[in-house]
Structure formats: structure tokens, C-alpha cells
Image (spheres, grey):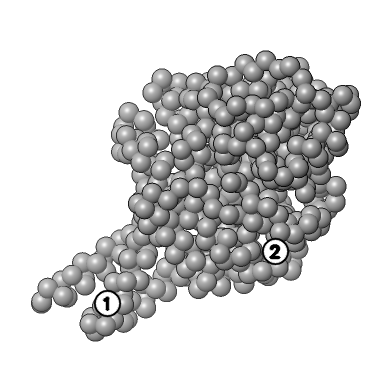
Amino acid sequence: MDFGYILYFTLVWLFLLYSLAIIAVYTWIGIYAYGATIRYKHKNVNTDYDLIARSVDAPGFSLLAPAYNEGRTIVENVRSLLSIYYPNMEIIIINDGSKDNSIEQLIAAYDLESISFLVQGTLETKPIRAVYKSKNPAFKRLIVVDKENGGKADALNVGINVSAKDYIVCIDVDCILEQDAILKLAKPFLEQTEKRVIACGGVIRLANNCRIENGKIMEVNLPKSLLGRTQALEYIRAFILGRMAWSRASGLILISGAFGAFDKKVVLACGGYDKNTVGEDMELVVRMRRYMEERNEPHEVVNIPDPLCWTEVPESRAILTKQRNRWMRGTMETLKKHRKLFFNPKYRRLGMISYPYWFFFEFLGPIVEFTGYIIFLIFLFLGLINWPFFLALLALVLSYGILYSIYAILIDLVTDQVYTKREHLMKLMLTAILEPFYFHLVVVQAGVRGVIDYFRKKTGWGEMTRQGFQQKEINKPAKRS
């Protein structure tokens, strides 16, 4: 047997073993997530959230919403946030040096006036120009901070410095929150016992093509485009299966930057958000967990399966590619910064399970797959392909991926989530079958490009223009400078 065949069989078996490892991991995720979701539903079916709202022990939340060039929609977005039902809460809008009329719009709409304000936090940030509060008692929960432009992480750090509550909730200003979102988010913090809950997230859903009135979701619809529907399916897998499984296993290291709650004392002790990464949401959670592990303090990062937040996802391939490129660069920056965790027993599950999972599957996954395509083309040209074996392996991988997606759709259905119409289910099932042949390839390409851009020292978010919700005007300005 010559060297070519030895190399061929070696690579084939490596890819086979990697595929089997992925199947094993995601089978565990699927089974573990189902138990976690069902247990949560049974535990909370009779919960009276009004009792939490009236409780003197209810934790206080500071809701932080950075805004950059949001003048065309900022007034309605803030009105939506003001409608959230939770007594012990303040809403802090951080105008991150917008070049449009965002601050003027807010001043006029909410009767704001500049006030003297003692900033208690000590995180280093760009200078604050002014702090505003409303002269109207109806908006007494609202604080608006105008600052020099420094990016999303810097804006959030300013919000943390200004905040007065024990917990912070970080959101994108154009996200739509359910009115009881903070009530449900508060429950895990109230229930903590020997393990300190340092962060909590909920399920994020897609607002694309939904009917929205006065900042509320009135009718749930799937996105119109295949690209949008595939992301709806992806979010089901990520939140209902992935994050619920890792939350139950005490191994969760990511809370979405679109919506998440954090223990402010731990955030401050860790130094706040890192302004030198495009993946500041994941990096902060990893740093918080590392901080707690190094002090041997029992802790948890929790995800709950309630749909609490609605956001818009890109339905343009170009914008989606930029987003996934940034996600990959953020992942790599976090993994590099915290490489000390890699198979380090000192950090227990964080070092032995969570970090290795992200390294081998979330980071290496697109690289391994892309490398497989190249090797296939080379072996095809050399005539070394064992077609029966190749087709069997391909069928295994494709069928498992499709079945895993269908399983996620069914779990979403039995736990009474949002896509319950027959039309929704049929479209999601069809999307699960089509995904491997289009969307998955786009994501792999974007991930590989993200790796290349990381080594090219490319920084920044890129232009992330959105279509806008049905109630909003189209061609919204870029999210970040």
C-alpha cells in the first residue's frame, strides 16, 4: 500500500472519529436539554410572578441599553422599555456619541433635563458629556447618559458605572422585551442558595416578519426568507437545546449580548466589559466564571427556556457573513485570552469540559469541515475516493443533522414555545432539510473567513445595517461605528 492510500485512510478515519464525537456531544445535549426544559416548566407552572413583583426581597435591576445613531426609532424603543412590568428597576439609555439627533429626540420626547450625577462605578471609560433625567414623574425610572463614542463595551461600562441596582441587564436598544421578562429573569437570582447565580439569560426569538404594535409582539410569524427561517431554527437549537443543556450541567459560558442579566458586584470585580474584543459578551462570562473558580466560590450561570426577548436577524447573506465572521473572531479572542483554562483541572468543569468543547467544536468545527472539502477535492482528482464509504459517511452526517433539527423543533413545540401553528412547523421542517445545503455552507465560509481575518488583525464590528421591524422604517443606520 503506497503513501497516498495510507494518508487517505488516516484522514478518513480522523474525519469519521471527529464526526462521531460531534454526534455523541449533540446527542447528550439533546437528551440533557429535554430534561432541563421539562423540569423548568413543571417547576414554574404555578409560579405567581406578581408575588415576586411585590416582594421586598425582589432584586433590583438596572437595564442598560447602548444606542448609536438610533434617532429614527429611539423614542419608540425607549417607550417599549418603559412598559416593562417590574417595580424595582431603572432604565439607563447610553447614547454612545451618536452623530444623528438621538439625544435631541430623547430630550424632546421625555422632557429631559441635565442633572448633577455622582458616578459611583470605577470602570475606565470614555468621558460622559451629560446625564439626563425627566421632569415628568411618569418617566422617573429613565436615565439617559450622553457620552463620547467608544463602542458597545465602553457604553455598557458607562452604564455599569452609573447604575444603582444590584443586578444589571444588558440589551440592544432595538430589542423587544416581553413585559414580564425581568420578572422571570429575577426568579433564578431569588432562588439561589449555596451557589451564587452570577449571570442569567433567556430565550431570544426572531422579530423578523412579526406584527409589532407599540413595542409589543402582537402576532408571531416566521421570517419570509429562507435565510431568516434557518436562523429561527438555529436559535431554537441554540437556546432550547444547547444553552439549556449547558446550564443544567453548570457549564454555560455564553449569555447573549442581546439580552442577559449579571451580578454587578462580580462584574465590577472582574473589571467590566473588555473593550478590546468583538466578543465582549462571551468574554465577560468566561472571565466571571474564572474569577469565581479562582476564589473557590460556588456559582452558576443559568439559562431559562422562556422566550423573553425578540430581536432582528440579518436576512442578507452579506450582512449574515459579517456577523458570523465577527462571532468567530470574538470566539478566538476569548479562547486565546483564557487559554490557561484549557484542560486545567484547577477550573473544574470550566477548564475540563466547557473550554475544550468550545475549542474543539465551536472554533475548530468550521476549520475541520472546510479542510475536509479541500481534501475531498484533492482525493477526487487523484481517484482515491472510496465511494461506498464516503456516501455512507455523508448520509450519516446529513441525516443526523436534519434529525437533530427536527428534534429541536418538536421540543420547542411540546414545551409550548412560540412556533405552534401547523404552517410554522411545516416550514421549519422543510428548513431543517434544506439547511445543510445552503445556510450551513454560508456559516462555515464565514467562520473560516473570520479565522483568516483574526490572523490578519482585522478588528471592528463591520456595518450591520438592518431591514427594520414592520413597525419601523427601513434602512436603519449601522449599529456601531
The quarter of the rendered structure image containing the N terminus is: bottom left
Res. 253 visible in picture: no
Residue type, mark 2 in image? Pro
Count of labels in the image: 2
Residue under numbered circle 1:
378
Q: Position of residue 423 (x, y in %)?
A: 74, 68
Question: Pointer 1: residues within 10 angstroms few (<14), some, or many (20+)?
Answer: few
Classify residue 179 as left or right of residue 452: right
Q: CA distance from mark 1 to mark 2?
A: 39 Å
Crowding at dot 2, Cα within 10 Å, few <14 / some 14-19 / many 20+, comes out as many
* Residue nearer the viewer, 12 or 400: 12
- At mark 2, the secondary structure is loop
**Pointer 1 or 2: first along the chain:** 2
What residue is at 58 percent from the left and 39 percent from the top?
Answer: 152
Residue flagged by tag 1: what amino acid is it? Ile
Residue at image coords 36%, 44%: 356
Please tell me which residue is depicted at 62% across the width and 16% down the height of the picture.
120
Judge by depth and name the residue closer to the eye, 45 or 233: 233
Residue at image position (68%, 43%) is 99
The quadrant where residue 141 appears: top right
In the rendered image of this protein, does residue 423 appear above or below residue 139? below
37 lies above or below 269: below
Residue 359 can be seen, yes or no: yes
- In the figure, residue 87 lies in which quadrant? top right
Name the spot of residue 46 as percent of width and height, x first: 76, 36
Horizontal side, residue 479 vs residue 374: left or right: right
Question: Residue 196 is drawn in which quadrant?
Answer: top right
Q: Whole-percent x and y of residue 135?
A: 87, 24
Name the disc covering residue 421, or none: none
**Local SS, label 1:** helix
Which residue is identified by label 2? 223
